[in-house]
Image (spheres, grey):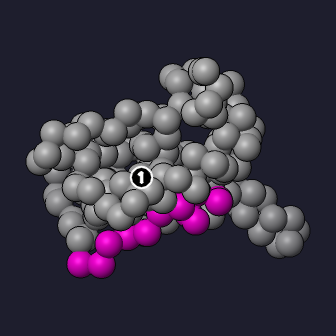
Amino acid sequence: MILLLAVCMGAMAKGDKMPKYDITGAGSGTEGTVLVKVFVYKKNAKDEDLKRAAVHGIVFRGCSGNQSGARQPAMAPATAEADNATFCEEFFAADGPCQNYASVVAGSYERVKTQKGYKSGAIIQVDKTSLRKELEKAGVVRTLSSGF
C-alpha cells in the first residue's frame, strides 16, 4: 500500500499545474539567450517554478519590453499548447526538460508580500536558440524557414 501511495504521489507531483506567473523583459543576454524577470504567485516558489514559468512565458506568452523597448513575441501560436497537450504536460512538468533551457541569475531573487499572499521572482536567462530547436523537433513551433 505504501509503495502504491508513493507511486501515485510521484505521478501527481510530476503532472502538477503551471503556477500563476508574470513575465517581463529584463535586458539583453548573450547571443541566443533572452533575460526575463519572472514572478511566481506561490508562497514557497523554488528555482524549478521560476525556470519553467520563464520558459513557458517565452514559448506561449512572449513578454513586454524592457528599458530598451524591445518586445519578445511568443514563439508558438496561441493554439499550440492545446494542440500539443501531451508534449507540453511532460515538457513543463515540475522536473521536466524545460528546466534545461533556463538558469537563474545569481543575486536577482525577490520576494514580495501581496494582498493575496506572496510572489517570488528572479531574473532568468533562457537559451532561446536551443529551446526553439527542441520545440521545432517536437512540432510545437514552426521552423523559421517554413514560411518561405
Q: In the rendered image, is residue 43 in sight?
A: no
Residue at 27%, 37% (x, y): give it. 71
Q: Position of residue 72 (x, y in %)?
A: 33, 39
Give the amino acid at mark 1: Ala
Label 1 Cα crowd, 10 Å radius (few <14 / some 14-19 / many 20+): many
Q: Secondary structure at mark 1?
A: helix
From the viewer's perspective, tell me whether residue 106 is left or right of residue 97: left
Q: Position of residue 132 (x, y in %)?
A: 57, 46
From the viewer's perspective, tell me whether residue 24 is left or right of residue 62: left
Residue 27, quarter of the rendered image: bottom left
Question: 71 and 99: which one is in front?
Answer: 71
Q: In the rendered image, is residue 135 in sight?
A: yes
Q: Position of residue 144 (x, y in %)?
A: 58, 33
From the viewer's perspective, tell me whether residue 94 is left or right of residue 23: right
The total of numbered circles placed on residues is 1
Q: Which residue is mark 1?
A: 54
In the image, the segment drawn in magenta is 96-107
Look at the image and say whether residue 103 sits in the magenta stretch. yes
Residue at 48%, 59% (x, y): give it. 127
Question: 53 and 32: which one is in front?
Answer: 32
Question: 52 and 148: which one is in front?
Answer: 148
The quarter of the image holding the N terminus is: bottom right
Q: Position of residue 20 (x, y in %)?
A: 39, 43
The quarter of the image holding the C terminus is: top right
